[in-house]
Amino acid sequence: MFSITEEAEIYVADLFEQQDEKDLGLKVDVEKAGTPVATVTFNFCIKSDLPDSYNEFPFVGFSAFIDESNNHFLSDSNVALKLDGTNKKLTITAPNAKGEAPKDDAPLEEKVLFTIVTEVNPSLASHGGFVDLVEITEKKEVILNFKDGVEKQLKGLYPEISAVLDATDHSHKENAYM
């Protein structure tokens, strides 16, 4: 289910040894599990503060705690230690955390949302931009809060889209695209 390489286990155990707190554990959570933007987080925790839904996974020098609702998303995951010069960093490979891309027969809204979250918004983020899906009409018109550069991509991927429309009023020039 959830594994930690020997090097990472030693590193984490050393971190715990440096803490003054007894009963400290490592809480492993998946934020936005099953979505394209899912992330795995590690946090120190006190075992007695956790809800009963957290299961304990003992390791040498510490215990990890994972909520039952995240078991599927963390199955086949692996924590490793990455060495970068003198820096050490924990990395996790969690192939099930983000869920799966929508199937070809999935509703158009699901496919468009997945594309926006996984492809469009990451490329716009470097410019401080983002796109939100406002709605998809019965005529298969996709209405976004900002369509520049997105229309061609969406229509190329999903030919059933009749139009991509911009819901934002850009007639006010001051901060019109913010």
Image: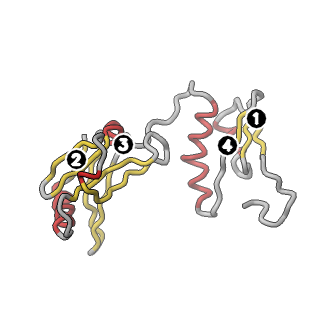
> Are the residues tagged 4 and 2 within 8 Å (C-beta)?
no
Task: Report whether 158 appears left or right of 88.
Answer: right
Q: What residue does disc 2 label? A: 3
> Are the residues tagged 3 and 2 within 8 Å (C-beta)?
no
> Are the residues tagged 1 and 4 within 8 Å (C-beta)?
no
Q: How crowded is mark 2: few (under 14 residues within 10 Å), some or many (20 or more)?
A: some
Q: In which quarter of the image is residue 84?
A: bottom left
Q: What's the amino acid at mark 1?
A: Glu
Q: Nearer the viewer, residue 138 or 61?
A: 61
Instruction: Measure the C-alpha gap from mark 2 to mark 1.
Output: 46 Å
Q: What's the amino acid at mark 2?
A: Ser
Task: Report whether 15 appears left or right of 171.
Answer: left
* Residue 67: x %, y % from top left: 31, 42
Q: Earlier in the sequence, mark 1 or mark 4?
A: 4
Task: Report whether 57 appears left or right of 156.
Answer: left
Q: Residues within 10 Å of mark 1 (few under 14, many from 20)?
A: some
Q: Earlier in the sequence, mark 3 or mark 4?
A: 3
* Residue 169: x %, y % from top left: 82, 53
Q: Residue at x 78, y 46 (%)?
A: 167
Q: What residue does disc 1 label? A: 141
Instruction: Measure the C-alpha gap from mark 3 to mark 4.
Output: 26 Å
Q: Which mark is drawn over residue 95?
A: 3
Q: Residue furthest front?
A: 48
Q: What residue does disc 4 label? A: 133
